[in-house]
Image (spheres, coloured by chain):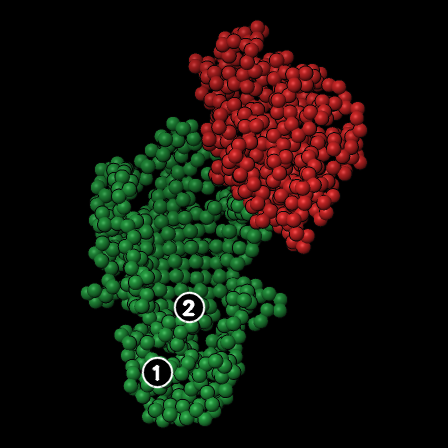
Chain colours: A red, B green
Amino acid sequence: MKAFRGPFLRDEAAHLLRRAAFAATPAAVDRAVADGLDATVERLLAPSVDAAADRRDADLRRSDEPHAVAAAWLARAATTPDPLGEALVLFWHDHFVSALAKVGEPRMMFDQFALFRAAGRGSFVALTQAVARDPAMVRYLDLERTTKDAPNENFARELLELFTTGPGPYGERDVKEAARAFTGYGLRAGRFRFVPASHDDGEKTVFGVRGRFGGDDVARLAAERPETAAFLARKFARRFVADVPADAVVAALAAAWTAAGGDVARTLGVLFRSEAFYAPAHRRAVVRCPASFVVGALRAGGVAAPPSPADLARRTLAMGRAVGDPPSVKGYPGGDAWRHPAARLARLDFLAHLVEVEGARLSPPPLATRDELAAFARDVSGSAPTRAELDAILRAVKDDDPARDRRRLGLLFARPECDRC
Amino acid sequence: MSRLALALRCVVLLLLLRPAAAQDVDAFDPLSVVPEDCRICVDVADLGRFLTALRSENLWAGLPDAATAEARAGLERLAAIGARRVVFGAEAGLGKSWVLLVSADDAERALKGLRELVPAAKPLRVGKWAGLGSDDDAVDRLASVAAQKKPSVLRRDGFAAARKAFGGGDVFVHVDLAGTRWLRGGAGKAKDLGQALLAAHVLGAAATADAITARVDLDGGLRVRAGAPMRALGPDRAFAAPSSRPGAAPPIPAPPGTSLRLALRRDLAAFWARRESFVADDARTGVAEFQNNLSILLGGLAAEEVFAGLGDRFDLYVGPPPAENPAPRHAFPTAAVVVDVPDAALRTELLLGFQTTLGVVNAEAAQQRRPRYLIETADHRGARLVTSRFLPELLPDADDDRLQLRPTLAFAGSRMILATHPDAARALLDAAAQPAAPADGRTEDRLEFDGAAAARAVRSAAGFLAAQEALKKGGAPEEAAATIEFLAGLVARVERASIAFGVAPAEKDAATATFELDLRAPSVLPVKAGAPR
């Protein structure tokens, strides 16, 4: 991709942080501008440990509460020092879809999220192979019930259609042959186990390549296909560039993907330094999903410890998204599908609750003057309010209001412009 | 009121009361001048002793000032004016007509103090007693009672008997509830199977009791005993007030480490025979399924046969977590239910039924590819334990919570022990082997609580509780952990507590509900620095 040559100023830094880190607080933007583009991108891409969240997850993982998965992720994402890591967890959860409704055990979804956290910015081949062995995925796509006498095609079909190449480069025979490669996969005691006796060890032909393939082999074949580069590039572009990315951007990103050998962090490093990423047409071109909206508001508000995670999960669900429990293997359509009247009302209701009930947990920057309001709005939304809007906010929340800053934050975030990032 | 008018009023009252009590303050019964229409009567026998006990309670000192400041200040000021015994009567509440009487060595000083305490009230003297009335009418009515022109509360139906039963403590309280009957009409009519089984007697008392009398003692804790005459439970609720069956095995003493014990007395045979009267229409299918499943699991026995073979005492014990616990911070208390089964044939069916039930559970788990129970037997003190457990190698985590659930059945003589873990069953068998305590003769429902044991249980499950806290309240894990530790510390300060509720038949259509709270908690809350003692 063509590298970004322009100056990395406040707007560019805020744009990068909104996309890659859920929110751009003034302090974070200041630091990014001071550090420069390369250092900021490297810092975003570097994984970091969130020990407090790990301890909380260790307890919550044992919970039988269905919303524990969503609650734990929202709580972690709201305060993590590694926001891109959590953005990638959500990205891979949307890509390698599993749903609690079928998986049944929250523990398995916790473990799958942990897998995405640990391996989500490395090799796509390795990630795909690991996902095929992930207990939640094994259960969700019926690898528990696949034997050489009766290969279950569910996983193999979705591997090709939804996880790697997308429709096109394979036929029904490829699906059947790939399914044979995953025979013998299954679970015992809730853990992955491979039973050689149930595995079809014979020769298979997948994508025209012949061999005595096992599951890892087929995962690699699929993950390394050029169509996969284009398919994944479009998905990354939809998440990080625009809801409807131009084909040229997708092609360039696919080339970067291929050049990086399917390494996620290296590909994102190229993307975040690219001219396309900062193109004016791509500013505020992505609709925030409910989870990103909730986390974005919390992080913009400077939350130090998350408010009731169970409540956050319920409110995110009211906006139309069940983290950990999507409605189908295709996940959510995204884009403008998030923006319907009921979801809008739910977003406003969440903001009112956050500001008025959980406001004590917020520590927004001072929002006393019109200039401070405008600068903050520009950082968090990429869009400067009109003078009339600013005056309306100043009138609605008086200067001597003891909850002035958080209430003004709520009104700023309630602008429809903040539905996008 | 002018000084002259006050003097005249006091003289009149003194003359009226002279024959009865004016000579000896201790011989005079102050309740004898409290008008009968006072629905609330409170008699504090020794205000000094009462306040001393209150001041030594950290609970009193630790409560938020706003909650107790007014009451505390009032009592302290009463003591400061030399009040010893305090009697209060009110028509229906503090906003209505009321009278207050205090005995003091210096009645004149007490009267002066009372006037300063409630300037708007009307002062009065009754012999050596000083007092206040809410208004002139209240004072006049007290005078009429003193002159025996109107009856006192002592003439009220059942008052004397209630006072005999509940008097003599630090505080005597009597509340006439007859006027509130219309508010409580439906309290005993719930058509809910679970509610009827567990609370039929409570609902019955709540619906029909016209008065409640209580005695409060503050000697080393808080002890409240209360009684209320009520209408006898109807035949469809009589199962909630059973008499102890002759020949029944005595209850097993609580093993060491028991944090909670609940004893319920129910005649399940009578309950089952009358089920139609409290099963809601939408619950009938469930009851029919239960009846059918029970018969399948217990070798074809009808539900009537099963319940007829059970005793009428059900004891629930909540004990410490399993000794071999693989999940620190996630260790859950064990629990066991003990019921006497006098019918030997039924004991055999229950033993087999336990195995059948686990078999059914296993079959269903196998279909769903979930872990199944391994069923084993063991001996302890000559009793056979049928136990079950998940094999660790079949669970995903070495400290999986399910390892703590090991349903167990055992018999201690005729008493069936159904426990969540063999540790609990063995502890009960050990306790049952101790020399039997004499029968306590109790027939009421009773809850006993050991604070230290409960605090250990809370701390053992701190990880689980912290997760629930973190999920619901948010914040950092450390905040949740601190909340759990505060809760454990609070619980630990309750040395022991018990609550009992029973209904004893009195006459044909009458019964008496009894309630007893015994809280031994010298320091429920830590005293805040600078808090009044």
Q: Does residue B424 sit above or below A77 in this rendering?
A: below
| Residue at (61, 48) in percent of width and height | A359
Res. A248 visible in picture: yes
In the displayed structure, does residue B67 sit left or right of residue A38? left
- Identify the disc placed on residue B223: 2
Label 1 element class: helix
| Residue at (22, 40) in percent of width and height | B301
Callouts 2 and 1 on one subunit? yes
In the displayed structure, does residue B66 sit left or right of residue B148? right
Percent across and percent down for residue B190 are 29, 52
Q: Nearer the viewer, mark 2 or mark 1?
A: 1
CA separation, marks 2 and 1? Answer: 34 Å
Percent across and percent down for residue A70 are 54, 36
Q: Nearer the viewer, residue B137 or A116?
A: B137
| Callout 1 amino acid | Arg
Q: Which residue position holds label 1?
A: B141
| Callout 2 amino acid | Arg
In the displayed structure, does residue B459 sit left or right of residue A124? left
Q: Does residue B434 sit above or below A151 in this rendering?
A: below
| Residue at (78, 30) in percent of width and height | A8
Percent across and percent down for residue A327 are 48, 28
